[in-house]
Image (cartoon, rainbow, N blue to C red):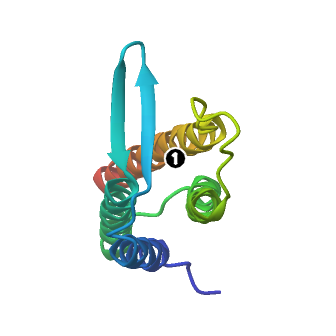
């Protein structure tokens, strides 16, 4: 049975997200976050571009593990891969839904963006937890590899 090459999957997801960001470059979609009396407006293009850079770097780390035969914990690697793919799909589908959703002009002071903010915030929270799992997996598998190398 051949080993799963995770770096290829992460590079494919990064390339897909980069292409999606480039095709929606002129889009007016943005994530508006209101914290007390300050608005943070983050264009969706920048979010997806940041996501693709992080995914490409993650793929590079997985490639280094593959290149130097450092075996990762399979369960944590699968959780990281599947979770990242699911979050990526949720972000893209959420963007498409909120882009084509008709606006409600009955009450113009309320944008009805709370669902969008909740979706993106939870997605990036889960994405951050997945990155912590990845860092844990990477560090401890490297430590185990170095300990085995020093003992032999």
Regarding residue 43, the answer to whether it shows in the image is yes
Q: Which residue is mark 1?
A: 127
Quadrant of residue 54 within the rendered picture:
bottom left
Regarding residue 152, the answer to whether it shows in the image is no
**20 lies above or below 134:** below
Horizontally, is 6 left or right of 139 in the view? right
Q: Position of residue 86 (x, y in %)?
A: 64, 61
Q: Position of residue 126 (x, y in %)?
A: 58, 42
- What quarter of the picture does the C terminus occupy? bottom left
Looking at the picture, tell me which residue is in the foreground, 56 or 119: 119
Q: Badge 1: how crowded within 10 Å, few (<14), some, or many (20+)? A: many
Looking at the picture, tell me which residue is in the foreground, 144 or 41: 41
**87 lies above or below 10:** above
**142 lies above or below 124:** below
Residue furthest toward the bottom? 1
Looking at the picture, tell me which residue is in the foreground, 102 or 143: 102
Counting labels gives 1
Quadrant of residue 60 within the rendered picture:
bottom left
Q: Residue at x 62, y 61 (%)?
A: 78
């Amino acid at each position: 049975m051949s080993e799963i090459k995770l770096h290829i999957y992460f590079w494919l997801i990064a390339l897909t997200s980069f292409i999606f960001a480039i095709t929606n470059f002129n889009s007016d979609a943005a994530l508006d976050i209101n914290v007390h009396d300050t608005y943070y407006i983050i264009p969706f293009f920048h979010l997806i571009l940041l996501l693709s850079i992080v995914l490409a770097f993650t793929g590079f780390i997985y490639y280094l593990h593959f290149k130097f035969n450092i075996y990762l914990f399979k369960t944590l690697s699968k959780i990281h891969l599947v979770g990242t793919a699911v979050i990526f799909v949720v972000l893209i589908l959420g963007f498409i839904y909120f882009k084509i959703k008709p606006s409600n002009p009955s009450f113009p002071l309320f944008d009805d963006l709370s669902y969008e903010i909740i979706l993106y915030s939870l997605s990036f929270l889960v994405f951050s937890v997945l990155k912590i799992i990845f860092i844990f997996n990477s560090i401890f598998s490297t430590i185990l590899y170095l300990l085995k190398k020093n003992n032999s």
